[in-house]
């Protein structure tokens, strides 16, 4: 490989795979792809119009150099495209171009592309191989790893989907250089979540948010994700720790009709959960201040205009809740969180404590 600084993280799910993370590795993707998908003759590159401007032709050249036939789907960027109509369009391009069961999909882009392409791969002909090539910070640290794939319904985010692990994740952090500043910052919401879960150096580095630390930071987040996903692939136990900040955060995202992006909502969700836990005597005094300062330093929002009752009502419709209960991730300290299944009345008490 032509570059230095390459880290490989082995994800031990039912079908294990590697996350290869580095700087300047994009053009080395071809041989790695053929190693994990040796029977593919055709590759479907799925991406959005923003990412395509920078990376589509380059990716096509890389794959053609491996004697692969390339087909592609390029759809408009943005969460609004993550719907059944786009999913159907992707599947029909696959079918019209005679993509077979032994062929593969390359998901080239951020979280929306990864989810859409992953779900198209999971469902086409009952499942074909997918390789994730993340180009955003959010996709590097979270959505490209762990096999969650989905599309949204008007009734809610990610309501249709599948667990479908990729054959490989190939993450060149240099792709972040072409990412708009707002998306860089947005991805830091998930990074900070990892910092609060793990504490120590990961929290320190997350709050500093320095470019020179990004390889170390991203690799630490992926290792943390591996820890939870390898233990609990289908999210019936420990993987739920990764929902830290998401109970309130996801509710805010839904209430804003997705005009406030995911990472920003997670950052606000972290602060709200910390404040609620501190008010209830669960968190060490000062925890909220530390998280608030980190969020502020990164440049993410710290406040919401939504009230506690509407936040709880939105959380009630979250697919992670049952009729009467929801499992939340409580913050006891930086680096010490716990899972608790509570009633919606108890959630309401937490929301009021956070926003009073
Ligand atoms: N984004 C949380 C998870 O993959 O479980």
Image (cartoon, grey):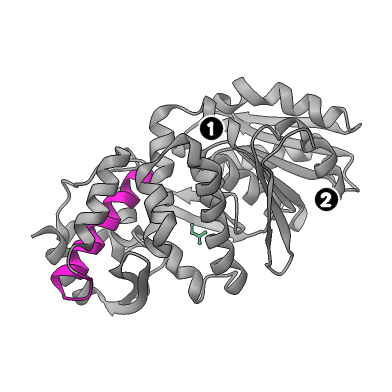
| Disc 2: which residue | 36
Tell me the crowding category of disc 2: few under 14, some 14 to 19, or many 20 or more residues within 10 angstroms, Cα based. some
Q: Earlier in the sequence, mark 1 or mark 2?
A: 2
Q: Nearer the viewer, residue 177 or 3?
A: 3
Q: CA distance from mark 1 to mark 2?
A: 25 Å
328 in magenta: no
Query: Where is residue 83 drawn, in percent x and y?
Result: 51, 43
Q: State the extent of the magenta-drawn residues as a range.
A: 262-284
Tell me where residue 8 appears, x and y as whole percent: 70, 52
Foreground mark, 1 or 2, reads 1
On screen, residue 123 versus residue 262, left or right, reads: right
Q: Position of residue 109 (x, y in %)?
A: 59, 36
Q: 258 or 106: nearer the eye?
A: 106
Tell me what residue is drawn at x 29 percent, y 78 percent: 342
Placement of 82 over or under 243, stated as above or below: above
Residue for badge 1? 176
Residue 337 appears anywhere in the view: yes
Neighbor class of circle 1 (other Cα within 10 Å; few <14, some 14-19, many 20+) is: some
Q: Which mark is residue 321?
A: none
Task: Answer whether residue 268 is magenta in the image.
Answer: yes
> Looking at the image, is 336 positioned above or below residue 100?
below
Residue 217 in the image: state x and y as whole percent. Answer: 50, 48
Contact flag, marks 1 and 2 (Cβ < 8 Å): no
For image coordinates 36% across by 41% down, the residue present is 261
| Residue nearest the observer in this picture, 177 or 322 | 177
- The N terminus is located in which quarter? top right
Residue 278: image quadrant is bottom left
| Residue 162 vertical placement versus 212 (above, below) | below
In the figure, is residue 108 to the left or right of 140?
A: right
The residue that appears at 40% across and 48% down in the rendered structure is 206
**Any part of residue 255 in sight:** no
Q: What kind of element bears circle 1?
A: helix
């Amino acid at each position: 490989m032509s570059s230095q600084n390459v880290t490989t993280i082995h994800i031990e799910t039912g079908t294990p795979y590697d996350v290869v993370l580095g700087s300047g590795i994009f053009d080395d993707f071809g041989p790695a792809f053929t190693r994990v998908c040796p029977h593919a003759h055709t590759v479907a590159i799925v991406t959005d119009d923003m990412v395509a401007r920078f990376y589509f032709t380059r990716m096509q050249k890389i794959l053609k150099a491996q004697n692969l036939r390339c087909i592609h789907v390029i759809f408009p960027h943005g969460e609004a495209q993550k719907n059944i109509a786009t999913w159907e369009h992707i599947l029909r391009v696959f079918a019209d171009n005679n993509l077979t069961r032994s062929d593969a999909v390359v998901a080239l882009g951020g979280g929306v592309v990864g989810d859409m392409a992953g779900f198209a791969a999971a469902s086409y002909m009952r499942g074909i191989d997918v390789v994730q090539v993340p180009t955003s910070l959010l996709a590097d640290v979270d959505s490209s790893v762990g096999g969650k794939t989905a599309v949204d319904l008007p009734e809610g985010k990610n309501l249709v989907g599948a667990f479908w692990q990729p054959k490989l994740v190939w993450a060149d952090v240099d792709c972040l250089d072409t990412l708009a500043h707002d998306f860089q910052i947005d991805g830091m919401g998930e990074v900070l979540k990892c910092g609060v879960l793990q504490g120590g150096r990961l929290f320190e580095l997350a709050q500093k948010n320095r470019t020179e630390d990004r390889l170390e930071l991203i690799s630490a987040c992926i290792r943390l994700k591996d820890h939870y996903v390898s233990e609990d692939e289908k999210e019936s136990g420990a993987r739920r720790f990764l929902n830290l900040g998401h109970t309130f955060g996801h509710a805010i995202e839904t209430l804003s009709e997705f005009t406030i992006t995911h990472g920003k909502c997670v950052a606000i969700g972290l602060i709200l959960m910390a404040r609620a836990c501190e008010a209830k005597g669960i968190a060490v005094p000062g925890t909220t201040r530390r998280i608030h300062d980190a969020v502020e330093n990164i440049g993410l929002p710290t406040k919401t205009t939504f009230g506690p009752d509407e936040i709880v009502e939105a959380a009630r419709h979250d697919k992670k809740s049952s009729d009467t209960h929801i499992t939340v991730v409580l913050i006891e300290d930086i680096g010490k969180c716990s899972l608790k299944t509570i009633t919606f009345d108890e959630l309401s008490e937490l929301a009021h404590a956070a926003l009073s």
